[in-house]
Amino acid sequence: MKDRFAAVALLTMLAAPATAAWTSAWAADPLGICLDEDRPPLSAHHKGKPDSGFDVLLAQAIADRMGRPLKIQWFESKLDEDSSPQLEANALLSDGRCSLIGGYALTTDSLVKPGVQTARLPDFAGATRDDRRRRVALGMLAPTRPYVYSPMTVVLGSKARERRIAEIGDLAGLRLAIESGSLGDAILMTFDKGKLIDNITHLVPGRDDLLGALNRGDYDATLIDLARYDAHRAAHPDTAITASGYYYPIGANRGYVGLGSDPALIEAVNKALADLVTEGKIAELGKQAGLTYLPPREPAILGDVWTKIIQR
């Protein structure tokens, strides 16, 4: 009997270093997070400048909580009508470029099973010519809990900065500019059965400078993501445009998405986020990054946004 206990003890002793080594290796494994390189004040990565943004700070805080080094994979998301953020995110994750995508808008449409089996990768740091050509077999996305609320806000030009905006109807009579195919476009075009259509000018995403035109006085108002206004204000402290203080009632939370095949990671990130919320750290990081931080709202995952807009 003593020999048996001695053998078990010996096996346990021999296994202990291997177990410790495995745990150490897991902790040393970088936490890969993909971030958009040009979405200030959420995330920004430009040659000759330090990486910056709320999602950069939060990613580091999450990695620190998990006891893992952080590795950011930067990618470029094109602002055009043909791009699909859902498929781009899925392709990056499914190709192993990262384990999480940060700043992801949590809507039912963005989390459904892909309608295609493969997709191309977006441009990303370190991409080769072959990377730009090949297609990636897609998986299923799984969200974490949200960490910030991202609403649409009305921004006013210099000639209309005194206009009080309490609802979309208060934009009547103003010269409105909006980017074609955007969420703001759908909201303004369908409001009250097209009441604002005659006053709307459509601009081309990625080609026309929407906020620059507003600043010059070419138009009186637009409807954009609040973070985009924050970025403009930070880059142009003397801007003539101003936030109205009005938030469109249908907005989306942002969080992380990973692959459904790694539920342990999603659980670990949720715990880290919960701890950071309890300590008030996330709001502090938002302020540090120059973001107008708003905490997540219910529902955590926004439903059919297009139907909600049309029915309003």
Image (cartoon, rainbow, N blue to C red):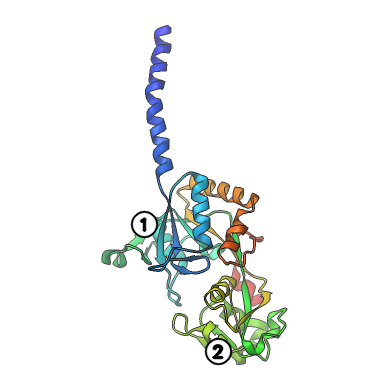
Number of the front mark, 1 or 2: 2
Q: Residue 3 or 295: which is nearer the viewer?
A: 295
Q: Residue 177 or 72: which is nearer the viewer?
A: 72
Q: Residue at x 47, y 81 (%)?
A: 205
Q: Residue at x 40, y 43 (%)?
A: 28
Question: x and y percent of residue 3 in the render?
Answer: 39, 8
Q: Amino acid at mark 1?
A: Asp
Question: x and y percent of residue 87 in the render?
Answer: 43, 65
Question: x and y percent of residue 208 in the render?
Answer: 47, 85
Q: Is residue 115 visible?
A: no
Seen in the image, is 47 located left or right of residue 289? left
Point out the image quarter for the C terminus.
Answer: bottom right
Seen in the image, is 91 located left or right of residue 151? left
Tag of residue 216: 2
Pointer 1 residue = 95
Q: Is residue 145 visible?
A: yes
Looking at the rendering, which quadrant does residue 245 occupy?
Answer: bottom right
